Amino acid sequence: EHPDLGKLREIEIQLENGKRKIIQISPFTVKTEDGYRIGSITRDITEQRRAADVSRENEERFVHVFHASPSQMAITDISTGKYMDVNQSFLQSLGFTREEVIDKTAAELNIFVDPSQRASLIEKMKEQGYLRGEDVRVRTKTGDLRHGVFSGEYIQMQEHTFLLTVMNDITERKLAEDAVLETRRRLLEAQEL
């Protein structure tokens, strides 16, 4: 018996018109009255391979953008709420290590200042299918409060649905706005005197 029989093989061929195709071949033996013959089942898998290549390239691009982003990004399992991945900006802003975050929920890490806000965001996400520009207050590992603009989107990865969230920390902007408002208030009080 031949060692390659029964094994799927993929080969690339070039047609007369110059196009290249990827063919999957499954060789087998057949017993006939004249002895054994070798046959094969062949299948053109060119489009499947191209689709898989495009999908892999898109996933690689996504991973690069996810980890390079200055925004705090997280991927959570929608059924458990556990963090599956977070980027470096998330870790730096909130003061956690990757080990402290992965496989934990926002509730376990006490991230949302108001847990009912998290629940309402989840409800809104279920209704709309996305979130855009939601104001949130979060807590760092050390207990400092941060203000953020929060967005979320469902994504498909490896045949599972996850929640991709993005938060931009606007704490410094909020503090500056509050300082301007306080200065205006004092100026108005001074003018009234």
Image (tube, grey):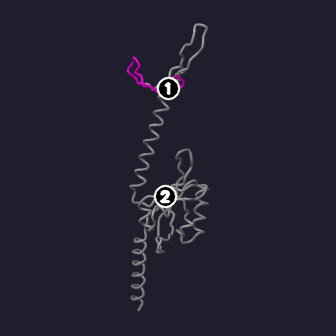
Q: Is 138 or 121 nearer to us in this picture?
A: 138
Look at 39% across and 18% down and name the residue there.
17
**Quick one: label 1, few (<14), some, or many (20+) residues within 10 Å?**
some
Task: Kindly give the residue lying farthest to the top in the view shown.
Answer: 34
Look at 42% across and 89% down and name the residue there.
192
150 shown above or below 171: above
Say which mark, if any, is on residue 165. none
Say which mark, if any, is on residue 74. 2
Q: Is 116 or 5 nearer to us in this picture?
A: 5
- The amino acid sitting under disc 1 is Gln
- The amino acid sitting under disc 2 is Ala
Residue 2 on image: x %, y %: 50, 20
Residue 10 on image: x %, y %: 47, 27
Q: Secondary structure at mark 2?
A: strand
Residue 157 on image: x %, y %: 52, 47
Look at 39% across and 77% down and name the residue there.
180
Task: For marks 1 and 2, give the CA distance.
Answer: 39 Å
Look at the image and give the residue range highlighted in magenta. Answer: 5-20
Q: Is 51 or 102 nearer to us in this picture?
A: 102
